[in-house]
Amino acid sequence: MPTNTQPIPHSIILGIESSCDDTAAAVFENGKILANITATQKVHEQYGGVVPELASRAHQSNIIPVVSEALNKAGKTIQDIDAIAVTQGPGLLGSLQVGFQFAKGLALGANIPFVGVNHLQAHISALFIETPNLQLPMIALLVSGGHTQLVWVESVDSMEIIGTTIDDAAGEAFDKAAKLLGLGYPGGPLIDKYAAQGNAKAYDFPDSQTAPLDFSFSGIKTSLLYFLRKEIDKNPNFVADEIANICASYQHQVVNILMKRLKKAIEKHKPGSIGLAGGVSANSELRKAFILMGEKFKLNSHIPSFEFCTDNAAMIAMAGHFLLNAGIQSTMDAAPFSKNNSHNFQTRTP
Ligand code: KG4
Ligand code: ZN
């Protein structure tokens, strides 16, 4: 069970992340990230997506070297660490188990507290690494390979989901489209690259009906599938001939789907600022549209540096710092969880 204890105000925190296919460790001291190390697993590229069993095996080989490298880079040993923050969920259970059990063992051996961190809350906490005093309340658009959410951020430890995808995540919309187009994995950066040379108005892709602040990406993916089948029937070289225009048009509609809901959320909830989080925030068109949205509503728009956007352990250490400061720690019976079942982010028991 998470327990409420005395806050740990000044502390050196080791953050550990292993929720999907990146093994990561970071060291945080006094509001500063001293080291932020990520080992990305290349083994999944050939399969066009993450293979859970291979991911958990790779985490097992990577975890000790990655944590050692982070401590070395920060000039610290485990004896210098005051607390450990580790991703508890959501994510792939086999992957989460590796980081979580490792963190527990390390905390037990070093006789220091540890805290389980919600991965989604951590993506948003990443916004505070470079801008500690951003204006709250904020609406964060969290867009990653596994999640697409609008989050009302009241304070660093009070966040509520106000909109969510009802099917695929935005990153999945990119990755699955890339697979249909015969591009590699992860597909987002490749679609982004081809889109830069294409015409976004060349083809029309649909937006699905949802509740005002919710997202749906399965329709656009299916429409791409049928569109490609039809066009390839007429011209077998259609994909090769038109790759830039297809990518530009598809990307444009994904960004449009995201921006429409963000606009509605701003109009309804009137935040003090807006923030973008998660791996898809690397998308060049999304970044531009997000900044324009901030300008339109005269709001500061925050986008973290790329190293803090994709899965990383600095965001876990940052979120852990907020939880520990609020007096929250985990106990040894805590276990990872695969799904976020609540509209609030919490650390939980199974
Ligand atoms: O946050 P993240 O690193 O991992 C998850 O928690 O899922 O996000 C990974 C996702 C992948 O779906 C990848 O295709 C997408 O972020 N992505 C992009 C771009 N760079 C990464 N999507 C669109 N454009 C990009 N430039
Ligand atoms: Zn993530």
Image (cartoon, rainbow, N blue to C red):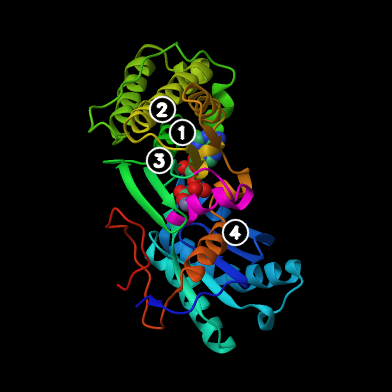
In the rendered picture of this protein, how many numbered marks are placed on residues? 4
What's under tag 1, amino acid-wise? Ala
Quickly name the residue at label 2: 259
Q: Is mark 3 within 8 Å of ligand 1?
A: yes
Marks 2/3: CA distance?
17 Å
Residue 213, image x, y percentages: 29, 35
Residue 172, numbered label: 3
Q: Is mark 1 within 8 Å of ligand 1?
A: yes
Q: Secondary structure at mark 4?
A: helix
User: Which mark is first along the chain, 2 or 4?
Assistant: 2
Quickly name the residue at label 4: 314
What's under tag 2, amino acid-wise? Met
Q: Nearer the viewer, residue 337 or 315?
A: 315
Task: Give me the residue at 50% from left, 77% from top.
Answer: 114
Q: Secondary structure at mark 2?
A: helix
Residue 25, image x, y percentages: 61, 65
Residue 151, numbered label: none
Segment colored magenta: 121-135
Quickly name the residue at label 1: 178
What's under tag 3, amino acid-wise? Glu
Q: Are marks 4 and 2 in contact (CB under 8 Å)?
A: no
Q: Secondary structure at mark 3?
A: helix
Q: Are marks 4 and 1 in contact (CB under 8 Å)?
A: no
